[in-house]
Amino acid sequence: MTLSVQAAANRRGILAMIGAMTSFVINDAFVKYASQSLPGGQLIVVRGLFAIVFLFAGAWWMGLVRGPEARLRDLWQRPVITRSVLDAVSTMTFLTALFHLPLANATAINMAAPLCITLLSVLWLGERIGAMRWLVIAIGFVGVLLIVQPRSEGFNGYSLVCLLSTFFVACRDLYTRRINPGTPSILITIGTAIAVTASGAVLSLFQQWQPVTLAQLAMLAAASVFLSSGYMLLIRAMRAGDVSLIVPFRYSGLLAALTIGFVVWGEIPNALAWAGIALLVAAGLYMVISERARARDRVLESAPE
């Protein structure tokens, strides 16, 4: 691959990552706004049904759910099912927290996923990391504490629910490695959509359903479009160019969350939260950059002399 082709692929990947993170935040904003008038379980079901229809339409167009090339059996692979369950748990806990937290705070806490992944890689996969990376993990979680502010008068216990969601996101991302690389990403996404919708249906059994207006229906349909688009753009980003260069742009979602939170709800993080966001982003970027350097060193060590 020539330098110009690589640069073009990197640009496409970066734009796709920014688009994905922005789409996810817009979806979160629609869902958070809808939660002011609709029970959580109900809106998750309605949004999920829209998402499943859109995703199945995409899979149909790709020939993955019809004809001799149908791959629906891939949905029943144990790793796909396990990942879908982990994703459903992470989504349900995140949305529960999102309904009670400022959009920017919830998004920022969720950005601690790379730190959780590194920590779980040590505890779960037995990977070894140096003292510097341990220090960065500690700094990152100090950032999370500054955002959560457990001892401040304005402490919101749902911040801890959001942090629990981040843990499940990390488990999901680590478990994704066990899925056959040949499994189409859109089918994995369909599995997730089904699991999340089913979880919402169970939750809705304990809530009183409300009449849905046309405006609310349109809002949830739009949320499902942004959610599905976010997944597709994220897949495109991770398959284009230099992943270690593209991944840091996931933090662009914070800018979108801060902007939407201020415009729609007038939310402005306090000074401690701003400091926490800065520490968290810095720690996450360091992890990405150091991992890029480690990967380059491994390639050089394995190259024939």
Image: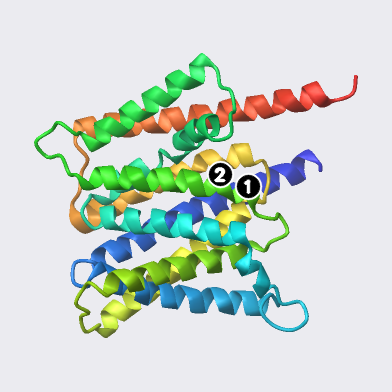
Q: Is residue 74 left or right of residue 25?
A: right
Q: Residue 156 in the image: x percent, y percent?
A: 17, 44
The location of residue 105, given as percent across then percent down, is 28, 44
Q: Amino acid at mark 2?
A: Leu
* Residue drawn at x 24%, y 37% as measured from the top left: 148
- The kind of residue tagged 1 is Arg
Task: Give the residue number, with chain letter if any, for mark 2.
Answer: 174
289 over 64 or under it: above or below: above
Marks 1,2: beta carbons within 8 A: yes
Q: Residue at x 82, y 25 (%)?
A: 302
240 up-or-down from 182: above or below = above
Q: Which residue is more in the foreground, 200 or 280? A: 200
Q: For the residue labelled by badge 1, is the local secondary structure a helix, a strand or a loop?
A: helix
Q: What is the distance, in whole Å, between disc 1 and disc 2 at their CAs?
A: 6 Å
User: Taking 27 as reference, is 13 above or below it?
Assistant: above
> Which residue position is annotated with label 1?
177
Closer to us: 81 or 214: 81
Residue 258 visible, this orientation: no
